[in-house]
Amino acid sequence: MISLKSQHQPCLLKLFDCVLVASFLRSIRTCRTRFVRISTPVLHHTFTMMPRFIPPRLDVIENIEEYYPGGYHPISIGDVFDQGRFRVLHKLGFGGSSTVWLARDQLEGKHRGRIVTLRAMRADVSSSNEMPELAILQKLRALLPPSEYVNFQTIDHHFFVQGPNGSHLFLISPLAGPSILVMSDSPGRVAGSRRLRADLARKVSKQLVTTVYHMHNMGIVHGDLTTSNILFCLSPHVLEWSDAEVYSHLGDPETEEVTTRDRQPPGLHAPAVLIAPIQNSKISHASLLQERTVICDFGQSYLPASPPSSYKPGTLLNYQSPEGRFEGRASFEADIWSLGCAIFEIRAGLALFEPILGSDTDILRQTVEMLGRLPDPWWGAFKHRSLWFEEDGQPKSEQDQERAGLLLKSHATSIRAKLLRIGELDVRPFGGDDDGPMMEKHGTRLPDVEVELLTDLLGKMLRYRPEERISIQDVMQHPWFML
């Protein structure tokens, strides 16, 4: 902890900022998903010896050191599982608890030959008595009509595989397309330059709100509503692609041989080669997608009427409600907060609270900039508040922040101000004038009437005190969706 009473305070504050920047640089290097994100809690392994493997050249890849007893299951292209039913074609992504693959369901019958998502869970997660996702989806399937259940990415089949690292639960789901987060990705351009066109953003937001409404109506909290968990549905013809069409559209798997530091073979616990996930751009073309979404990742979902005894919120920091951050509480109201953050991002193409530094302190700084002073006792728990803010929650003057030696300064803003800036700094796509029929034209600004309506909606969803936030029923009926 940095003492603010030191006579060397300016130097130390610069050091504090440098720590944040270093955190950001590490987050870039360790970003590990393409269009699949899995956030199921995982048991952490602590290494007591030097890493065994030479770091791979591939950037977007799981940690090779996590292939050990209790960790990931080694998988290669062409592997078959469940008595030959599922054959691995390509890699979709990975998360802390699993690797995720494109596979073909070779079962004869109605869905013969369709491509699906195969998710191989770590062994230390597979040993849990109950997978929340399976239990939640089974409840939803039992209570919802089929017309509403299709808005969830289902788990249609599951089985166990015994491997060198233990017993692994495998989950099979219908293949879905890219997430909202991926669709808004604009590398080399100003964040927000690529975003869904206005009517599609409202349509997708209404689909999301309706899906959350059904969950809340069933007494279920999602617990992890983010744009990475909202997936576009693929056009039906994609699911019928032959192997040749898969590789023609998505490219051949990019691989790299696994090398140990002692130059010995990797052994049974690790794969012989690492495989990079499919590039985002390969699966994001409008011709492959429907203008319909599904919600996924129920690893943080639960029933408040019977919460798990060891439950801890796992929501991303820039989506996490104040009560989740300070008190470890998840609830229907916490879903409303996360939903508000997601709706802004769907419309703006960038996060409401930018997670660029990967720091809880920086997310809190942005939150207070926009919404003002936190209520007590949360304000007192914001340990570094005095770096940027007066005790009334107003940012300190530019001069005071300069004198303090801060590299990262704070300025007052608002939801309305952020909405008014959408489109202001757009950068044209490389090699063209637009990003395709699903995306907004470069430089398009929000009309005044939409700014006012969306400011009203988000302001009511992002109240600090959970009891003051509007309900999901009120969100459903808001006039912004009717524009």
Image: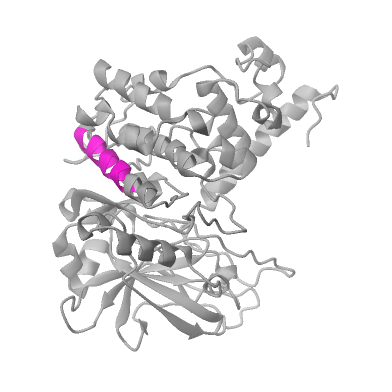
Q: Is residue 335 above or below residue 10?
A: below
> What colour scheme has been applied to the protein in the rendered image?
one colour
**Camera-nearest residue between 463 and 139:** 139
Is 349 placed left or right of 311 in the picture?
left
Task: Point out the stretch of residues depicted in magenta.
Answer: 199-211
> What x and y, as percent, mark residue 345?
37, 36
Q: Is 437 inside the magenta-drawn segment? A: no
Secondary structure mostly taken by the magenta-highlighted segment of the chain: helix
> What x and y, as percent, mark residue 107?
23, 83
**Camera-nearest residue between 427 and 170:** 170
Q: Is 207 inside the magenta-drawn segment? A: yes
Q: Residue at x 65, y 19 (%)?
A: 389
**Camera-nearest residue between 140 and 462:** 140
> What x and y, as percent, mark residue 221?
45, 50
Is 38 placed left or right of 395 in the picture?
left
Location of the C terminus by quadrant is: top left
Q: Farthest front residue? A: 305
Q: Residue at x 74, y 69 (%)?
A: 48
Q: Is residue 229 above or below residue 47?
A: above
Let me know if residue 37 appears in the view.
yes
Rendered image quadrant of residue 34: bottom left
Is 14 placed left or right of 145 in the picture?
right
Location of the N terminus by quadrant is: top right
Q: Residue at x 34, y 60 (%)?
A: 140
